[in-house]
Amino acid sequence: MLKLIHSKFLFSSLFLFLQAALIIQAAPKLAYTVSMEEPQTHYFQVEMTLTDMKQRYLDLKMATWTPGSYLIREYARHVEGFEASAGNQNLRAEKINKNTWRVYANNANQVKVKYKVYAFDLTVRTNFLDQSHGYLNGAALFLYPDKKLNLASTVTIKPYHQWKEISTGLQSVGGNKWVLQAPNFDVLADSPIEIGNQEIFTFEAAGVPHSVAIYGKPLYNQQRLKADMIKIVEAATAVTGENPNRNYTFIVHCGPGIGGGLEHLNSTTVQTSLFFATTEKTYKGFLGLISHEYFHLWNVKRIRPIALGPFDYENENYSNMLWVSEGITSYYDDLFMRRQGIYTPEQYLEIAAGSITGIENTPGNKVQSATEASFDAWIKNYRPNENSANATISYYSRGAVIGNLLDLEIMGATRGQKTLDDVFRYLWTEYYKKQKRGYTDEEFKRAVERVAGHNLDAFFKEHVAGTKTFDYNKYFGYAGLKLVNQQEGKTEAFLGANTSAATGKLLVTSVRRDSPAWQHGINVNDEILALNGFRVGTDLNALVQMYRPNDKVKVTVARAGRLLDLEVTLTNNPTVSYKLEKLPNATPEQVLVYNKWLRI
């Protein structure tokens, strides 16, 4: 009897083993091959091989946006020449909506799909190809099988024959740098690839090897840049005490008229001028960009609003919390540079005051809240118009100021024992590591309150969900500082029309809300011809300064082919220019907070 049971057990085990082996053998496989035989035409050729899908039809999709850049960009508009086959037989395929191709696979064991992607837009979120290099973003290049985002894939790059280098955060297969692997589409979409003859240098920081790939041959000191990038990596890692990467890749594009950055899971792409390192101001501005994108390793890619992942690549992914994800990252990017001595305390205080000046001189700061700016990023932030400054505020700039004030509030409440760093350590541990998910809006607020030790309902209601002006001196007072408006008491005539003479005509480009120009009907696109009968050159403000507040002036404009005389009453200039100054008799507690904040 025992022998019979034993035999049945062996038979069942063997059957299950063989069944599992068949399942493994039949697991769907996905592979891409990307070639660029004629880079001067700006077309990538993509071949997609789907094995063991065995479906009547396959729906293949192109993402409509890329994470970190919150705008529907319709990448499918660049796809051409779609065709599919199984063996030697062509398969019927049709496009069923703007970003979906249906392939009638007839349960074929292996399906090959070929298509081309036009790539001539050198931004951090699109594809580019010419005779000098190739750059691709996964979301903008690779189709993916519907409902199979978790499917692993390999990517074989066939570079143009003159190119020898490849830079990406993706891992190679078998030591072949031209064959890459991704565990799922999320990683594939989140790993840009630079191909060409870019300059590459490496360094180690926070125990992690870093690679820097620079396209464009800029004028810079490599050793200085390397030393400063190490400082930024160390400062960012110190917030949580852990660096999540095995390796990290910086892709740097240098050229005329480009700029910006986009964060990724273990890489970033940043763009800047060829001459970014020729002045201290532009060099430190570039370091600030590096600092910003690197801190996104934590704040966004891992410590994230729950709305931002898992991603829906076809539709908007709405969040109220971009003021945290982008804005507080903007606060930290300069702060890291202060912590590492790249900025002096005085230089950093000038930057902090400048951030406040920026939002308080933006009328939209009193119209749109930080949460509204975050939610409406998809329709407003990336689509500015001539009235944007009157109706909106950047979640970057207002969020940075909110982050600064929350940091001071925490330090003031805890007598310098806690900082905003402690909030991010808690979010890192509780939501990323322990619960393995993003945080909700309310959970972020509770995390700040937990560290500060008191309720912050009023702050979040009035300043985050609302547009109430901050009591700046309350918060800076914790550090023995006061905010001073350097324009206070000055008399200066103000019209409120911004102009440009780029076309040879002095045209109105924007009109400030509630200004004299706004109240008396000066319009965007009006050509300013004269003020009180005097011909206006290229500097309208110089002529306005001949007058005083409350003076009435006649502004002559050309509008739609007609000349108009508009009577305008000038006012005093309402704009501000802030500076942070030390209080004359700071208490020991204020000095402690000041030193804690600025790492003195």
Image (cartoon, rainbow, N blue to C red):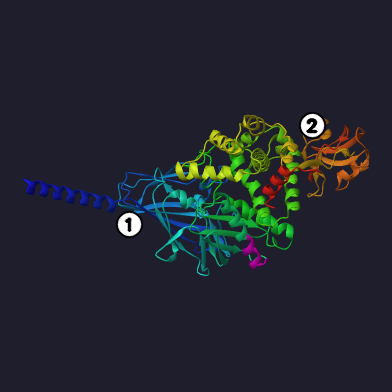
From the image, which quarter does the N terminus lie in? top left
First along the sequence among labels 1 and 2: 1
Magenta-colored stretch includes residue 226: yes
Which region of the structure is painted magenta? 219-228
Check disc 2 and report the residue beneath it. Answer: 514
Q: Is residue 223 left or right of residue 512?
A: left
| Count of labels in the image | 2
Name which residue type carries label 1: Asn
Q: Which residue is mark 1?
A: 88
Left or right: 515 in relation to 295 = right
**Magenta stretch mostly in which secondary structure?**
helix
Q: Position of residue 425 (x, y in %)?
A: 54, 45
Residue 49: image location, x then y, percent: 38, 55
Q: Nearer the viewer, residue 180 or 424?
A: 424
Residue at image coords 61%, 39%: 377
Q: Are marks 1 and 2 in contact (CB under 8 Å)?
A: no
Is residue 318 positioned above or below 273 on the image? above
